[in-house]
Amino acid sequence: MWRVEIESLLRGETRALARAISQIEARDPGVGETLERIWDSRPQSVDLSSQVVGLTGPPGSGKSTMADSLTQLWREQGLRVAVLAVDPNSPFTGGAILGDRVRMQRHALDPGVFIRSMGARGHLGGVSLATRGAVRLLDALGWEMVLVETVGVGQSELEICEVADSVVVVTTPGAGDGVQVIKAGITEIADIFAVNKADLPGADRVTRDLRDMLRLSTPKAGWKVPVVATVAAEGVTGVRELAAAIAAHRSHLEASGELSERLRRRLREEVVELVSARARAFATDLLAGGGPELLPEDARRADPERAADLVLGKFHNQGLGADAAELSTLTGRS
């Protein structure tokens, strides 16, 4: 990326940011150098990290409306907001199916709001490597709030914990009672519960069930998970309370030291994902033209364990890894 592009990024130009994220999605080898130059260009006095908020929940729970209402509130507070909406990929074009984000068009001309739809790209948890890279770029550029809205919710949605500082799980009266939430496997990932569409019948019962369930569970590192009733479609009811809960959780993370640990854990997981992706691409290319020494003609008599060892040996011999001292320096940087 040219120097003028980096200067455009530092000036906050939306088009430059969009191009940079496209390069991250394409796994451009120059992205790492660009990030280093951005960090080197940041004023020494600026040491605040982005607050990364994960927004997850079942389809139809109102996540996009919630993101829109939170964005409006944070903009009123003078904060710059980036929204990364992770959508399912089209099986035909590979693009994000819900890429229009119609509900958030009122922010389209606001330079303090950046909205990007990103494909899940086969990740069951709905958070791709490109999303992780985009979060890192936005943090380097000093965006105060980064909101990651995921595809949906379920056992595989645990990935959002590896990206967000605070995870908001959105549920609705129509999603069932607290037992259904437990079955979905999301009680462990929620830092905050938002019972949206609280004006519908049954909302009080869902709120009460969640609070009773949380009362019996062990607090997360000293944090008592709040349950906030919201009507995001109005943009008023419960939204300020939800934003206050998000801010309170951030303060808790900073005071307890958990924030720095989450940042380090996020880095470790991102490195593991990158190594996995590169090794998978290497193995795919190698096996596509592999001879009998890798894949025998009789597939039933094959030894996948031995073949995997051979592939990993060849991957290691490519010299793709850093030496121990350099690796320690890289992974020690949060």
Image (cartoon, rainbow, N blue to C red):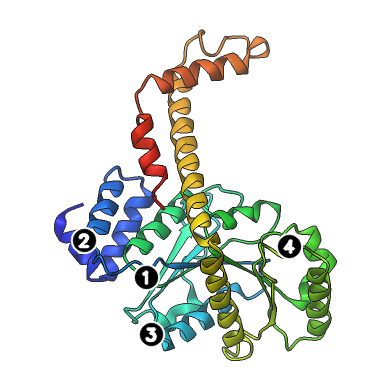
Residue at which label 3 appears? 78
Residue at which label 1 appears? 143
Residue 208 in view of the camera: yes
Compare marks 2 and 3 and give the one earlier in the sequence: 2
Q: Residues within 10 Å of mark 3 (few under 14, many from 20)?
A: few
Q: Secondary structure at mark 1?
A: loop
Compare marks 1 and 2 and give the one earlier in the sequence: 2
**In whole angstroms, how far apart are the C-alphas of marks 1 and 3?**
11 Å
Residue at which label 2 appears? 41
**Amino acid type, mark 2:** Ser
**Amino acid type, mark 4:** Thr
Compare marks 2 and 4 and give the one earlier in the sequence: 2
Q: Which tag is nearer the camera, tag 1 or tag 2?
A: 2
Q: Residues within 10 Å of mark 4 (few under 14, many from 20)?
A: some
Q: Residues within 10 Å of mark 1 (few under 14, many from 20)?
A: many
Residue at which label 4 appears? 187
**In whole angstroms, how far apart are the C-alphas of marks 2 and 4?**
41 Å
Considering depth in this image, is 64 or 305 the residue closer to the camera? 305
**In whole angstroms, how far apart are the C-alphas of marks 2 and 3?**
23 Å
Instruction: Kindly identify the residue that appears in the image at 46 percent across and 31 percent down.
Output: 279
**In whole angstroms, how far apart are the C-alphas of marks 1 and 4?**
29 Å
Compare marks 1 and 4 and give the one earlier in the sequence: 1
Pointer 2 with pointer 4, Cβ within 8 A: no
Q: Secondary structure at mark 2?
A: helix
**Amino acid type, mark 3:** Gly
Compare marks 1 and 3 and give the one earlier in the sequence: 3
Instruction: Kindly identify the residue that appears in the image at 40 percent across and 80 percent down.
Output: 79
